[in-house]
Image (spheres, rainbow, N blue to C red):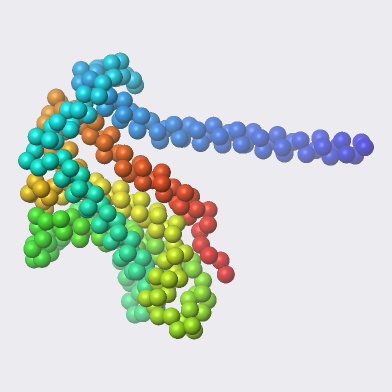
């Protein structure tokens, strides 16, 4: 009996330390979560403030007299353009869906070839893709504009879709995920007579759902914010971010409209992330298929 009591006392020390570590982790994660949510909270608060409260110093972290006038002014200002508001929404949705789908398809196919096929120059191409992650898209903007001019797609939706259809980050992400699939699985499919195209779309890609969802989040967020100010000039082809930017760039009197527009543009990416976050967590928890 005394020996059992000593064992219980001995085990109480690690249990106490574990409880303290759990509490510290909870406090730390809560603080980090609040720190990340704070910009979203501040954006919403600024959007419901009257214009006269936006320039109060020191600034307040709450709205004294909350109002929705900024949102009404935003929709009213956009409706004053030559095309209806629904046209801007359609353009943004069309461009975003097209770019997201194109990135998922092209990145998956290119990543499969780079990860599971051996051909001359494979290492060089992989190195070029990794190096391209260091550069912003503005570095190649002049070359893109020259190519689009030769293709005669300036001032058309293709000028927004085609340059964004290929993403080095998407190829790198999918390649890292596909490279973890056992080669034995692909060899078994080849023995059964499957070609590369069938192996890619019927064996490899179905096992990449978490990575595809992660890529979809990144692609959607980037495509939703496309403005195309240098390649789109006709009003009927402009996206919603471009129209909102035009409205909110009218000076300090439109500061409230700018904050309301920021909230409006924030909603779709947040919804997509909430719907797909389960797959992102699964990507982190299950990093690949083990032999």
Front-most of residues 51 and 205: 205
Q: Quadrant of residue 66?
A: top left
Front-most of residues 56 and 254: 254
Q: Quadrant of residue 103?
A: bottom left
Query: Relative to residue 83, is residue 272 drawn left or right?
Result: right
Q: Is residue 242 above or below residue 132?
A: above
Residue at 37% x, 62% y: name it: 172
Tell me the quarter of the image containing the N terminus: top right
Tell me the quarter of the image containing the C terminus: bottom right
Residue at 44% x, 31% y: name it: 34
Q: Is residue 280 above or below residue 79?
A: below
Image spot of residue 108 (x, y percent): 36, 65
Query: Relative to residue 230, is residue 113 drawn left or right?
Result: right
Whether residue 82 is visible here, answered yes or no, is yes
Image spot of residue 237 (x, y percent): 12, 50
Whether residue 136 is visible here, answered yes or no, is no
Farthest residue in the right direction? Answer: 1
Residue at 22% x, 53% y: name it: 95
């Amino acid at each position: 009996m005394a020996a059992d009591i000593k064992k219980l006392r001995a085990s109480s020390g690690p249990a106490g330390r574990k409880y303290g570590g759990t509490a510290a982790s909870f406090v730390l994660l809560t603080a980090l979560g609040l720190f990340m949510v704070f910009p979203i909270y501040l954006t919403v608060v600024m959007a419901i403030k009257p214009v006269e409260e936006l320039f109060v110093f020191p600034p307040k972290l709450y709205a004294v007299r909350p109002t929705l006038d900024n949102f009404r002014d935003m929709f009213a200002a956009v409706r004053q353009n030559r095309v209806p508001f629904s046209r801007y929404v359609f353009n943004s949705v069309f461009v975003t869906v097209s770019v997201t789908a194109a990135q998922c398809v092209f990145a998956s196919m290119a990543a499969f070839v780079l990860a599971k096929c051996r051909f001359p120059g494979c290492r060089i191409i992989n190195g070029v893709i990794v190096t391209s992650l260091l550069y912003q898209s503005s570095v190649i903007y002049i070359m893109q504009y020259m190519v689009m001019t030769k293709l005669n797609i300036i001032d058309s939706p293709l000028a927004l879709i085609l340059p964004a259809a290929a993403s080095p980050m998407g190829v790198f992400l999918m390649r890292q995920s596909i490279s973890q699939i056992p080669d034995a699985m692909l060899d078994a499919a080849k023995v059964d007579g499957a070609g590369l195209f069938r192996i890619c779309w019927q064996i490899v890609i179905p096992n990449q759902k978490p990575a595809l969802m992660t890529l979809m989040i990144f692609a959607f967020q980037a495509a939703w914010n496309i403005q195309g100010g240098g390649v789109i000039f006709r009003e009927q082809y402009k996206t919603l971010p471009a129209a909102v930017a035009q409205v909110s760039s009218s000076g300090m009197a439109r500061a409230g409209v700018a904050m309301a527009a920021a909230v409006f543009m924030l909603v779709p990416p947040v919804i997509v992330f909430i719907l797909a976050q389960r797959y992102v967590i699964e990507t982190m928890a299950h990093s690949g298929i083990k032999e």
